[in-house]
Image (cartoon, rainbow, N blue to C red):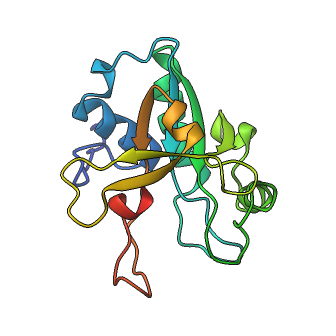
Amino acid sequence: MEKAKVYFTDFRTPVGTSWTAKLQRLCIAAGIKNIDFDKKFVAIKMHFGELGNLSFLRPNYARAIADLVKEQGGLPFLTDCNTLYPGSRKNALEHIECANINGFNSISTGCQIIIGDGLKGTDDIEVPVKNGEICKTAKIGRAVMDADIFISLAHFKGHEMTGFGGAIKNI
């Protein structure tokens, strides 16, 4: 009997391999295994989505990254900061509820969720922006600054005000 042919995708992986496995292999190829995560707090910064919005990475992608970090002895947590505008993410309680409704919790992601700038969005640290021409400092959520390692798990999307959103906007 002849063996079935295996076809490959653009990531050179067998058809049927999950997207989360591909994400993990991409991170490994990029050098994530070369980072010393042992006993270090690792902030995985992402957007949990607004209520009723589907433009966010799903919880299984966060879990794929958290699992890689934990395999290397790290202590991962998912984080985002509260919004300045009214909505479902304007304070930590509503933000975590929104995250839960959108499927983000310790069971689905394999790690805890910590809102980076605290209950009311006021727990931040002002840090200098090296070579900043317009912005000399930035206020960064304390939980993000307290982390030993920072991973940005950003999505790319169209944005009403700037034309696009992505990695820089996520940070």
> In the current view of this chain or complex, which residue is farthest to the bottom?
160
Quadrant housing residue 32: top left
- Residue 56 lies left or right of residue 162; in this view the side is right
The quarter in which the C terminus is drawn is: bottom left
Residue shown at 22%/54% (left/top)? 10
Quadrant occupied by the N terminus = top left
Asked whether 33 or 1 is in front, the reply is 33
User: Along the line of sight, which residue is nearer the eye, 27 or 47?
Assistant: 47
Q: In the image, is residue 156 above or below residue 117?
A: below
Above or below, comparing residue 126 to residue 163 in the picture: above
Which residue corresponds to the image point at 64% horizontal and 47% vertical from the top-left?
Answer: 123
Residue 83 position, x and y percent, is 61, 67
Q: Position of residue 137 (x, y in %)?
A: 37, 53
Horizontal side, residue 133 vs residue 142: left or right: left
Q: Is residue 56 left or right of residue 19?
A: right
Between 139 and 14, the one nearer to me in the picture = 139
In the depicted structure, whether residue 24 falls above or below residue 148: below
Q: Position of residue 50 (x, y in %)?
A: 65, 71
* Residue displayed at 73% across by 59% down: 95
**Number of numbered markers:** 0
Q: Is residue 18 visible?
A: no
Please tell me in which quadrant of the rendered image residue 120 appears: bottom right
| Camera-side residue of 58 and 98 | 98
Q: Is residue 11 left or right of residue 141?
A: left
Name the residue rendered at 27%, 19% in the picture: 34
Q: Is residue 61 visible?
A: yes
x then y, percent, for residue 48: 61, 59
